[in-house]
Amino acid sequence: MIDLLFDVNLQQLPDDYLTGNWRVADRVLNRNDPGSALAQATHLQLQPGLLHVEAPTQQDNGQWSVERDSLLSRPYLQMHLAREETRALVTRLRRSTDGAQSQLSLYFQSGMEMQLARP
């Protein structure tokens, strides 16, 4: 049975809604370096303040935080990895009522788009 997913108001998005183990469901690279850990990522693990990226040929660790713009309070993920530093706008977050399933859409400053799914 497929649970219904509901859009989360991004202006009121709690940071802990982003934590957990995410599977990369889809990605469009655009100008991103195709050899970077994020461009090849299959999984992202977001724990409070800690980021772990898994890719077929490499892994990378670092930190992440949520920042908001002052005008519309849009959430951005600020990611600091050992070999890469980037920022991604959270464009959509959908969750089941119990929070067990989620879909997250990110738009990176390089133009890369990434769709994540949990579990």
Image (tube, rainbow, N blue to C red):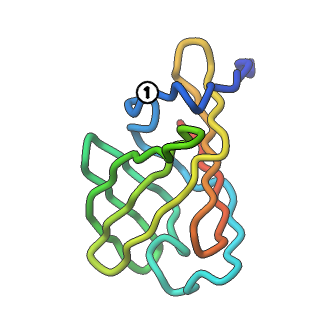
Q: Residue at x 39, y 63 (%)?
A: 53
What percent of the width, then of the height, locates residue 45? 38, 50
Question: In the picture shown, does residue 11 fall above or below 83?
Answer: above
Question: In the picture shown, does residue 10 fall above or below 87?
Answer: above
- Residue type at tag 1: Pro
- Secondary structure beneath dot 1 equals loop
Which residue is label 1 attached to?
14
Q: Which of 118/81 is in front? A: 81
Of the 4 image quadrants, the one containing the N terminus is top right
What percent of the width, then of the height, locates residue 49? 25, 47
Is 6 left, or right, of 98 in this rendering? right
Q: Residue at x 43, y 80 (%)?
A: 57
Crowdedness of circle 1 by 10 Å Cα count: few (<14), some, many (20+)? few
Is 93 left, or right, of 50 in this rendering? right
What percent of the width, then of the height, locates residue 66? 39, 45
Q: Which of 27/74 is in front? A: 74
